[in-house]
Amino acid sequence: MITGYITHPHCMLHHMGPEHPESPLRLEAIRARLSLSGLLQQTMQSEAREATEEELARVHPLRHLRALDKCVPDEGIVTLDSDTMMNPDSLNAARVAAGAVIRGVDQVFRHQADNVFCAVRPPGHHAEATDAMGFCFYNNVAVGAAHARAKYGARRIAILDYDVHQCNGTIDIFKDDPDVLVCTSFQYPFYPWRYLRSEWQNVINTPLEAGTDSAAFRRAIENDWLPALHRFKPELVLLSSGFDAHREDEMAELCLEEADFYWVTHMAMEIAALYADNRLVSVLEGGYHLDSLGRSAEAHLKALLGQPFSDAPALSA
């Protein structure tokens, strides 16, 4: 497998205050772990570019984009909501985060890589069409999906989100779009408190109780996602890869292990191999306990590179 690894230095410039969990240290933890393990050196590394206004406007109305632009402070930090703040570099970081997914889509459609991991921040899956929220400004994975459709004529795009929080923004943008299948697992009931009950045929909600462990998570994914994915037969698989469902992450109360992130990545790759000529692009969402975030990203990259994860239980579990 050729695995692309896309990031950008500007992703480190966005910050929302010294106590905010969505910090530049997250990308440092991932890079340090992947470098130490030798995995980073086995990837095809490249730098993201900024998404253009036209590319962002495929999923966010221009009036919303320009309203966000007007919020950028000259100095200091401004508050958009209780969770989401902006410094002078925040939208630059957000544009390269979205642009990373665009570059990843380009790489898999041009056969430059089999799959890609976008190590970027700020995250994106809570950003609705006209609402920045939940640490998110632009919906990175949605921008990538829209690019695949506009540039490569892709139909039947599957977005798989296993963050501990439901991807309300991705649902808001693609609900009732028959060419996009959104599969989302999340702790329930929990933030973002909307779209938690599925009312759309193209949205597969997998709510998980607090305390859900590996076996229950895998059963739920196999029962909910796999039948829908085999019916849908996606031409492109996109992953919103949140690692905050790890048992050590204090953001929530799910009890997953690194092996589970390896397992769900491997499952997604099997779907991509069956129907999408291996085309798979993953983008970082949550994950706030730095040590478990690094280990989980390592497990994710091992799967993408086609390497075994020796401590993982059998993949059919």
Image (cartoon, rainbow, N blue to C red):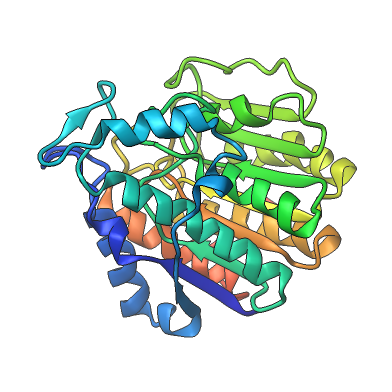
Q: Is residue 166 visible?
A: no
Residue 278 lies, in percent from the top left, at 75, 67
Q: Where 267 sits versus 91, above or below?
A: below
Residue 97 screen position, x and y as percent: 43, 54
Q: Which is nearer the eye, 165 or 310? A: 165
Q: Which image quadrant for residue 34?
A: bottom left
The quadrant the N terminus occupies is: bottom right
Residue 106, quarter of the rendered image: bottom right
Q: Residue furthest right?
A: 231
**Total tally of numbered discs in the picture:** 0
Answer above or below: position of 308 versus 201: below
| For residue 300, above or below residue 53 | below
Closest to the observer, 34 or 277: 277
Taking the spot 25% from the left edge, 37% from the top edge, the residue there is 72
Q: Nearer the viewer, residue 279 or 223?
A: 279
Vertical order, 154 against 80 (above or below):
below
Foreground residue, 312 or 8? Answer: 8
Q: Residue at x 54, y 33 (%)?
A: 60
52 with respect to 269 (left or right): left
The answer, for residue 30, to whether it is visible in the render is yes
Name the residue located 18 percent from the left edge and 30 percent from the top edge. 78
**Position in image of residue 111 (x %, y %):** 72, 76
Residue 295 position within the rendered picture, expressed as x and y whole percent measured from the top left: 37, 61
